[in-house]
Amino acid sequence: MRLPNLYFQNAAGQLLEDPAGFLRANWYSHPRGFDDTRALFTQMQRGLQRYGWSRILVNQVGMQSFSAQEQSWVAQEWLPQAVQEGGYRHGAVVVSREVLVRLATAYITTQVKGLPLVYRSFDTEAEAIQWLLQQPSSPHQ
């Protein structure tokens, strides 16, 4: 069994290429700047395009809440672009226990109206992976 390979890493978190056909986005718990967040999301889209994938496992356990600037940028700019240009279709989010992180994430995930994107939230990574693997690995399937 192959282990995930590191694709990108910065102060916000890391992206791993999972051999099962999806990206793993692991958010770090320490403070980050907007540029770090933007770079991590930008690399998520590039990774999807590079491999022709449509699925991301997002682990937010321990993550600090999104700032208002981050929320706005992700919801209004990144999400539509990631769906339309990156082929993003399924996001499995392992949620934080922190209420502010959950609220900020809920705001973003409710902005997908009209986009062919499905988000599901999970308490454990195992549940998230199980659901993600049931979804098509390519946006064209």
Image: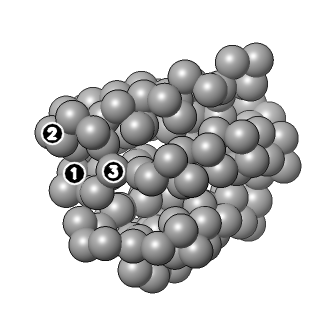
Residue 30 against residue 131 in the figure, above or below: below
- The three-letter amino acid code for the residue at tag 1 is Val
Q: Residue at x 42, y 51 (%)?
A: 66
**Residue that label 3 marks:** 65
Q: What quarter of the picture does the N terminus occupy? A: bottom left
Helix, strand or loop at mark 1: loop
In this view, 106 is above or below 1: above
Pick whichever of labels 3 and 2 is earlier in the sequence: 3
The residue singled out by tag 2 in the image is: 97
| Amino acid type at image mark 3 | Ser
Q: Mark 1 packing: few (<14 Cα in 10 Å), some, or many (20+)?
A: many
Q: Identify whether 89 is placed above or below 11.
A: above
Say above or below: 15 vs 79: below
Q: Residues within 10 Å of mark 3 (few under 14, many from 20)?
A: many
Q: How many marks?
A: 3
- Residue type, numbered disc 2: Arg
Q: Position of residue 141 (x, y in %)?
A: 74, 31
Give the foreground label among 3 and 2.
Answer: 3
